[in-house]
Each structure stands twice: as C-alpha cells, then as structure tokens.
Amino acid sequence: MSGRADDLQAVDAATLTPMVRAALGLDRAVVTSWRHEPFGHSLDEVYRTARSVFRFSGTARAVHHEVPWSLVLKIVTVAGTPDDPSSPANGDREPLAYRSFFLDHIPGIRAPRCYAIAERPGSRWLWLEHVSDDLGRVWRRERYQLAARHLARFNVAYLAGRTSVCYPWLSRSPLREAVGEMSRTVARIGDARDHPIVARAVSPESAKALLALLDKSGRWLDRLDRMPQAICHWDAHRANLLSRTNQNGVVETVAIDWAGLGWGPVGSELSKLLSQTVNFFGLDVEALPTLDGELFHHYVDGLREAGWSGDARVVRFGYTAAAAMRLIVRMATAIELAFDDHARTAFERSAGLDFATLADRFKSTLPYYLSLVDEADRLADLV
C-alpha cells in the first residue's frame, strides 16, 4: 500500500465520531460502520498527483436507530508557504480560509462546512460537509442565471474600499500568473497545428487571432488590475458549483474548491462559468450567445441588488477581458494535453468525453470567444 492508502485505512471511529456528530447534529451518535472511496470531479490523474478527495460514509447509532452519514475528506498538499502569501501558488490558502472562519458567513454563495483540519506532514486534511446537488449534473438555464446572481452578490460584498477583509493570503492577479506560464505554449501554436488534434480544434484564422490576443495580453492585464477589485472564488465553473435547497426552502449555490480565493476585477468571476458550462455540461453551442447575455444580465442585476451602482460597461470589460485571458490558458492546456498521451487519456476519463469530441466543441466555440476579444477591445478605453 502507498503511504496515503495506509493513512486512509488508519482512519478509525475515534477520528470520525466528533465530525459525524457535528454533521448529524447528534451529540451522542456512535459511528458503527464506515468506508471510503475516491470522490468528485478530479484532475489528479491528469497531473500525475495522488488522489486528493474522498468520500467517507457509513452508519451511526443514534438512540435506538441507525442513521446514514457522509463526509468529504480533501487532502491539500502544502509544499511550503511562498515568500508572498498572496501568490496563486500558495497551496495553504483553502485551509487558511477555513481557519479564518471567513467562509462561514459569506453572502451570495455558500461554502461547505469544515468540521476539522488535521495537520499531516506536508499536507492538511480538510474534513468537510458532503453537499449533494439537488438537481444532479444537468441544470436548467434558469439555474445558471441564479448562480450568476449569487456570484455577483458575493463579489460586491467584498469590494475594495468597502470591505475590511484584508487577509494577506488572499490571491492577487492569478490571471497574470497563469497567462505568464502559458504564453510560451500558445506562441508556438503555428507549429502545434502540425498535430492532428490541434489542427482539428484551431483553424489558421483562429490561430492568427490567438497570437494577436497574446500580443495585447500585457496591456489588458494592466487594465484589469486598474478595475474595481472584489474578492472572487476564481474557479466558479459548473463542476465546482452545487445547487442545494436549505431548510427554509431557499435555493443556495454552494461553491467547493476555494484554493484560488482572492482579489479580482468585477465581472471576471463570470468568465469561467460560461466557458465550462458549454464545454463539459452538454449545453448546445448554438445557445452560447444567448446564455452569455442572460448570465451577464443576471450578474449585473445581482450587483445592483447588493447596492452596486457602477457602470455596467466596465463590468462587461472585466468579464470579456478575463474571458480572453482565460482563453489563452485554455488554449495552452489543450495543446499540452494533445501532446501528452497519458494526460489526454486521463482527461478524457475525467470529462467523460473523448478528446476528438472536445476538440470539435472547442473549435465550434472558439469564434464566439474570439468575438468577446473584439468586444473587450471596444470597451477597453472605459477602464
């Protein structure tokens, strides 16, 4: 057995009992059985890292009957705190966010409850609430619209100059770092098109447009940094968002994976929700322009409802320019996967789609994302 497998097998009733009691709200519950299994959407195999998210479940005796329970264990590998704790590379950010209690009472969206954080050599074990999505994998469009409103309320509640939140570990400029890392790969797109999968995904015209985008990326990142800044989740795509109805009948958006939590321009949060929704959750590519308009409209409404009165065109630039920067990252990732057989096969298993299908979908959506680049160009002077 590997070290991690041994550690997981060593989890016992004494370890689980206080967390199961908290999850059930039963102070005298006694854990009677348990098991664990890999859980959730994972890219660990793609990046050749150890599996990091597991579901523990079982039964507990409460007075005179048995009740089921479940918890999520997320193992966060911590190589060491960087000199700049706001660096996107700070792997300790999610444990720090839970330890600060910041995630306990955030508006707009919710985070799973954290029952315990266990220190392990080189890692933190986060024992989290298991949140089931009431709707399953497929959401109706109206549910995406509600998620956009929820994200807006969260963002605007922590607008720079209006919030006292100032944790040093909040990330800054993750787009700048990601674009910096990925730019070299996209710069080689001309040669990369010799690969049949890349050629299938990117036409010569799109390749030219991507290189032009790369040339202006530095200027746009500077403009994004000058925009009104808000605290963002930074990875709010569909696989990280769950729909739950609380005990009062209110539909909540629960966000998981808070490793990127930090500052970002208003509007940027929305960009990943749009792209990942179409790419991985089966929405018709033809619906992309309409979905874009609906999500943005509801995001701005969410800002207004939370008391924000700024120019919606500035928000639109934040959204479209961030979408453009994410396009550089997505393109580089697609190229790297195309040339790495192991990672590509693992990605196919994770996505539940073969890479050729994903390449076709990427090609069909690329013209629309490039149109957002043109739109950001027209709005840039407002920032």
Image (cartoon, helix red, strand yellow):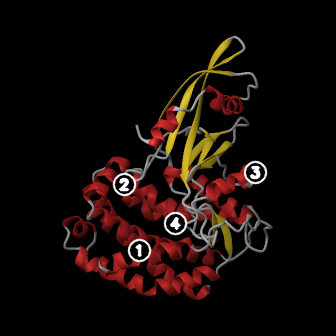
Q: CA distance from mark 3 to mark 2?
A: 34 Å
318 with respect to 374 (left or right): right
Q: Position of residue 358 (x, y in %)?
A: 31, 57
In the picture, residue 158 is in which quadrant?
bottom right
Which of the two discs, 4 and 2, labels the residue nearer the N terminus?
Answer: 2
Q: Measuring 35% from the left and 76% from the top, which residue is drawn there?
A: 186
Which of the two discs, 3 and 2, labels the residue nearer the N terminus?
Answer: 2
Q: Which residue is mark 1?
A: 182
Q: Measuring 65% from the left and 62% from the top, which residue is drawn there?
A: 152
Which of the two discs, 1 and 4, labels the residue nearer the N terminus?
Answer: 1
Q: Which residue is mark 3?
A: 105
Q: CA distance from mark 1 to mark 4?
A: 18 Å
Which of the two discs, 1 and 3, labels the residue nearer the N terminus?
Answer: 3
Q: Measuring 55% from the left and 45% from the top, which residue is drawn there?
A: 74
User: Is the Cβ of the residue at disc 4 closer than 8 Å to that at disc 3?
Assistant: no
Q: CA distance from mark 1 to mark 2?
A: 17 Å
Q: Position of residue 113 (x, y in %)?
A: 68, 43
Instruction: Name the residue type under label 3.
Output: His
267 with respect to 185 (left or right): right
Q: Which residue is mark 4?
A: 271
Count of numbered labels shown in the rendering: 4
